[in-house]
Image: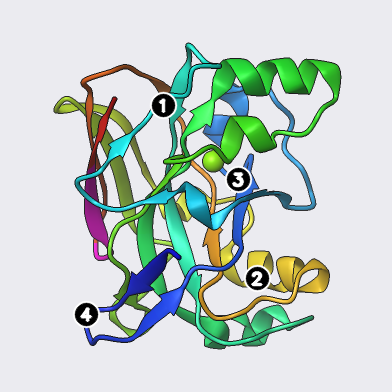
Amino acid sequence: MKSVRFGDGESFQVGKILCLGRNYPEHVKEMKAESSAIPVVFLKPSTAIIGPGENIVIPPNSGDVHHEVELVVVIGRDCRQVASDDAMEHVAGYAVGLDMTLRDVQADAKKRGLPWSVAKGFDSSAPLSAPVRRALVNDPHALPIELRVNGTVRQSSNTAHMIHRIPEIIAYCSTVFTLEPGDLIFTGTPEGVGRVVHGDRLDASIAGVGSLTVGVT
Ligand code: MG
C-alpha cells in the first residue's frame, strides 16, 4: 500500500486519487480544449504513486509521455456533500505532484470518445513529494509552481490561476465521491506541459509546499 507521511509522523494510506483536468486557463488553451463550468475529474489508482528519487517508467504503449506539475490536496477527514465554506477543514495538507500523461494514448482516447484511465493511471504516473500540513500553508491559491526538466524551466506559474479553487473542488467532488482520509486531489496543471524521455531528471517545486525530484526510464 502507498502512504503519505507528514513530518510529525502521522501517515495516511493513500485511497482514491482524484485529478482535475482543464483547471488553468493557459493550459486549456495550449491543449486547444474548452474550459468547463463544472470541474473535469478523472481518477488514478493508488498504485500510480512513486516517491522522491524514484523513476517514472515509460510504458511500452506510448511514445509521448508528458509532465504536468500540480498542487496536491491530502484529505484528512471523511466528507460527503460538504459545503465549500466548510471544505478546508477536511484538508490535512498539501504536496507537490506530477500527473504524468501518455499524451498520444489520451489523444487517441479523446478522438474515439473512450476513457482516459490507461493514459493517466499507469504505474509511476503519480510522483508525489512529502506532504506539508495545511496550517503551514497560508494561502494555497498564491503559490509559485514550477517544473524543470534537466535544469531547464518548462512550467512556471502560480496556483492563483486555478479556475476551480480548492474549496469548490472538494465540495464538488464530495457530491459524487465520499472523501476519506488519505484520498488525494491533484488540482490541475498550468501551461508548459511537454514530453519527457529516458534519462531525464524532473524537478518539481511549489513554494511553501515542497519539492520533488524524479527520473525517467
Ligand atoms: Mg493534470
**Three-letter amino acid code of the residue under disc 2:** Ile
Does the magenta portion include 209? yes
Of callouts 3 and 1, the N-terminal one? 3
Decide: marks 3, 1 in contact (CB < 8 A)?
no
Task: Return the disc, 2 or 3, that comes first in the chain's sequence.
Answer: 3
Residues packed near mark 3 inside 10 Å, few (<14), some (14 to 19) or many (20 plus): many
Give, as a three-letter code, the residue at label 4.
Gly
Q: 40 or 119: which is nearer to us?
A: 119
Residue at left offset 50%, top offset 52% = 47
Query: CB at mark 3 closer than 8 A to ligand 1?
Result: yes
Query: Residue 32: in sight, yes or no?
Result: no
Q: Quadrant of residue 7?
A: bottom left
Which residues make up the magenta segment?
Answer: 208-213
Q: Ligand 1 lies in which image quarter? A: top right
Answer with mark 1 or mark 4, whichever residue precedes in sequence: 4
Residue behind mark 4: 7
Residue neighbourhood size for the residue with mark 1, other residues' Cα within 10 Å, grouped as few (<14), some (14–19), many (≥20): some
Given the image, on which type of amino acid does mark 3 rest? Answer: Asn
Residue carrying label 1: 192
Q: Earlier in the sequence, mark 2 or mark 1?
A: 2
> Which callout, 2 or 3, points to the residue nearer the camera?
2
Q: Which residue is mark 3?
A: 23
Per the rendering, the mark at residue 55 is none
Q: Can you say which quadrant of the picture contains the N terminus?
A: bottom left
Q: How far, Cα to Cα, is label 2 from label 4?
A: 24 Å
Where disc 2 sits, the SS reads helix
